[in-house]
Image: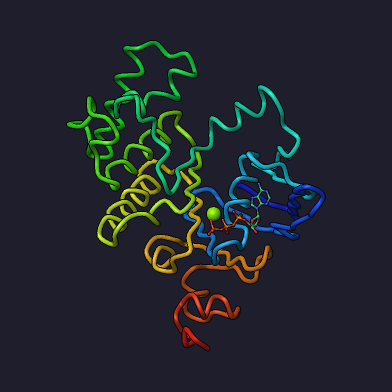
């Protein structure tokens, strides 16, 4: 279980302060596919980066399985991060490495020997349906295929949680569906908790069981995805659902 308790984050740029998160509290249960939705600049990426402490919260805490990890550093922090995979909108693959070498990169860092990591890498490529592409380079793959490679890489360390920051935003709708299906399959079959950041309400409709809506640095509503989509209370949620005329 991941709990964010009264989390705030203020960036200070050349003396000018900007609050990106204000008093955010939410609980992500094991096995959830938890959506965090909001418009551009709402604070979504900041929020997800606080979960694995790529950003240090200004105040409040991140509690994982009852342990306050907010001030973890060094070895403790790297051990924690190894249990949390992350995927991004622009895939973040290494252009100079083959598909297989991308997937095995976390295992190389961990010091696994070549035979073990290649075995695990091929297993993961098989899972995402890309074993035939193992020797190719990312530039030789389509966007959807590249995202599958980054999902395989995120799984290499057997994470309990995968953080997805706009993982499907660069993909067309059919490719989006196939990537979402893969995420749901990984959630169901491997029990990996998913935190899905998105600005597309369709992503929440398709795979999330819970959702939090963020607007202007604050959580404006949260609950079961079915309930929030059925009966949204926040103005921004109604707008994202298209229930308000776009020019109103
Ligand atoms: N490193 C930083 N330094 C200063 N301000 C930042 C930094 N990162 C984000 N911000 C600001 O914090 C606010 C929230 O940014 P964030 O990236 O979390 O939004 P987002 O919801 O992910 O937006 P998008 O949908 O466009 O990705 C924005 O106003 C942004 O300018
Ligand atoms: Mg973002």
Return the x and y of residue 14 as percentages of the image width and height.
78, 47
Vertical position of residue 229 compared to residue 135: above or below: below
Quadrant of ligand 2: it is: bottom right
- In the displayed structure, does residue 88 sit left or right of residue 7? left
> Horizontal and vertical percent for residue 122?
27, 26
Where residue 125 sits, quadrant-wise, is top left
In this rendering, is residue 139 above or below 111?
below
Q: Is 17 drawn above or below residue 77 in the view shown? A: below
In the image, 210 versus 115, the foreground residue is 115
Q: How is the image coloured?
A: rainbow
Rendered location of residue 92, percent (x, y): 43, 38
The reply, left or right, for residue 177 in relation to residue 63 is left
- Relative placement, left or right, of 93 versus 223 is left
Q: Is residue 113 above or below residue 168?
A: above
Name the residue rendered at 63%, 68% in the picture: 215
Which one is nearer the viewer's eye here, 83 or 41? 41
Q: How many marks?
A: 0
Q: Picture quarter containing residue 141?
A: top left
**Residue located farthest toward the right when viewing the structure as drawn:** 15
Q: What x and y, as percent, mark residue 234? A: 60, 78
Q: Residue at x 67, y 26 (%)?
A: 76
Q: Farthest residue to the left: give it.
A: 132
- Residue drawn at the location 60% of the way across and 61% of the way down: 41
Residue at 78 percent across and 50 percent down: it is 60
């Amino acid at each position: 279980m991941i709990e964010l308790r009264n989390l705030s984050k203020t960036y200070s740029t050349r003396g000018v302060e900007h609050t990106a998160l204000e008093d955010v509290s939410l609980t992500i249960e094991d096995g959830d596919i938890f959506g965090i939705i909001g418009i551009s600049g709402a604070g979504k990426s900041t929020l997800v980066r606080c979960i694995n402490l790529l950003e240090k919260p200004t105040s409040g805490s991140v509690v994982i399985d009852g342990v306050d990890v907010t001030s973890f550093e060094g070895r403790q922090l790297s051990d924690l991060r190894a249990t949390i995979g992350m995927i991004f909108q622009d895939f973040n693959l290494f252009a100079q490495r083959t598909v297989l070498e991308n997937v095995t990169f976390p295992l190389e860092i961990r010091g696994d020997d070549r035979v073990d990591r290649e075995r695990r890498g091929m297993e993961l490529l098989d899972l995402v349906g890309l074993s035939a592409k193992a020797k190719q380079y990312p530039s030789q793959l389509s966007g959807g295929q590249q995202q599958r490679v980054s999902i395989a890489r995120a799984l290499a360390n057997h994470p309990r949680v995968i953080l997805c920051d706009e993982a499907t935003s660069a993909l067309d709708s059919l490719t989006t569906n196939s990537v979402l299906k893969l995420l749901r399959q990984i959630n169901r079959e491997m029990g990996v908790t998913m935190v899905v950041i998105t600005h597309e309400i369709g992503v929440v409709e398709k795979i999330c069981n819970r959702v939090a809506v963020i607007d202007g640095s604050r959580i404006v509503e949260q609950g079961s995805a079915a309930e929030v989509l059925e009966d949204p209370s926040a103005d921004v949620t109604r707008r994202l659902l298209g229930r308000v005329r776009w020019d109103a």
